[in-house]
Amino acid sequence: MIPAAIHSTTERKALLRFLGKLGQAELNAGNAVPLVERDLAAIAKANGEPGLQVFVLPTVLFLKWESGDEFQVDMAHGAYRVAPLRFDQIEEVLTIARSARKGELTPTEGLVQLEAMWRTPHFYGDLGYICGYLLATIGVALMLRPSMNGLLITGVLSLICALVLVAARRRPSWSAVLPVVVAFFLSSAVAFGYRHGLKEPALTLLIPPLITFLPGMMLTVSVIELAYNSIVSGASRMVAGFTRLVLLAFGLIGGFKALNSDAGPSSIEVGTRLAAYWPWVGVVLFTLGLHIYQSSKRRSFGWMLLTAAMAYIGQTFSGLFIQGASTAFFGAALMTITALVIEFRFKGPPAIVTFLPGFWLLAPGSFGLMSITSMAAGHDAGGNIFTLLFSLTGIATGCLIGTFAYSALLHPRTAMWWRMQDP
């Protein structure tokens, strides 16, 4: 049922306030700017205000209502002024947006649900937060196939990082310096190990514990926004993502230099590495850990695992025929199609919830950290930056092509053979 057109000033103010709060929450959920603008415009139309103009940036959004000689402009702070969202909160935000687009939710009801969403506690508490982070990082480590000794060291570093993150959750002012500080102390610990005979690739040990700081999703969304011609938002996100990588690289190199150590051995003997099947176990552990760490809803875990597996399958099997960063394109396309089918055909969680784990598996953030660290050390700067950008473009293009393929071939509104299966 679509609500009647809004006539009173009070109702219009409630609508504008709801749209501002919802847009802010969607930006925190990691949604691309064009999709946020689409949602807000559709909700305004469903509430009898088709002429409402929406302009969104990653850090601010503007809403303009105009009728005859009357007009009103509202502004809301964007994603970087409030706390980041967990997976359960992301799902709740996008469910609210979907209901509001259909006219099933009034602005007042939407505001109440958004306020309740912000107050929702972590389902597993601090202990679950730590254990989930530890599982997720061990899963990433297994995909990198270190030795057993390297896996143990990674687990210890991850536990330290998780404890620091739990403390930082209650001190938001730490967020600005936390990436540098954590990277510095972890790299110092690894450099100290090299002084006592440790032989493991440095970044193989350090990337899994630092996974929460890697801006893979931010960098990929920036490329998607640029593809949609949202130049300002795409460029600003990309700069923010590269800044995060530079801060991490600064902390890592600073830790090694403080102990007069280089970046450690670049490889280990093949015979000491874990068997080739362990990365598949890593996918399961990573998804389970992320499910607990990010407090996603229980029904979401199976769908998250399926999408993550499809991303890893696409990237792994395409690697049998082609080499380099372009393999991420196939993983991104396959995971996007899978996530959209889950949402629209099987009424599962919103697509962004199920394919967020896939972004970490495709590793634009971790690869970017390797590239930035190498460039800071003066190793093949031009080649590293080109490969990083090619990887990001491949992931973003894979997401766009996957969305197009789903819309053209599989969406129930367009695919007759698909729609005929409805009861």
Image (cartoon, helix red, strand yellow):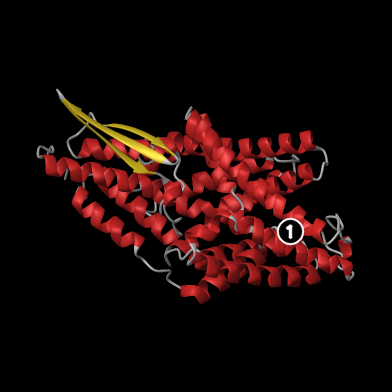
Residue positioned 49% across, 36% down in the render: 405
> How many other residues sit within 10 Å of disc 1, few (<14), some (14-19) or many (≥20)?
some
Name the residue type under label 1. Leu
The reply, left or right, for residue 32 in relation to residue 188 is left
- Label 1: which secondary element: helix
- Taking the view exactly as shown, the residue that stands out farthest to the left is 8
Q: Kindly indicate the quadrant of the structure image that contains residue 147.
A: bottom right
Residue at the image point whose x is 12% and y is 39% from the top: 9
Residue 218 visible in the shown view:
yes
Residue at horizontal 63 percent and vertical 67 percent from the top: 161
Q: Judge whether residue 277 can be spotted in this image.
A: no
Q: Position of residue 128 (x, y in %)?
A: 51, 74
Q: In the image, what residue occupies the spot 75% across and 47% down?
A: 373
422 relative position to 265: left or right: left
Quadrant of image for the N terminus: top left
Residue 380 occupies which quadrant of the picture? Answer: top right
Residue 85 x/y as whole percent: 44, 57
Front in this rendered view, residue 331 or 289: 289
Quarter where residue 391 is shown? top right
- Which residue reaches farthest bottom? 127
Task: Give coordinates of residue 38: x percent, y percent.
Answer: 35, 36
Q: Where is residue 385 drawn, in percent x and y? A: 72, 36
For mark 1, what is the residue?
A: 144
Task: From the viewer's side, name the closer residue of 291 and 189.
Answer: 189
Describe residue 380's horizontal placement relative to residue 55 as left or right: right
Indicate whether 65 appears above or below 24.
Answer: above
Q: Is residue 86 above or below residue 64?
A: below
Left or right: 111 with respect to 397?
left
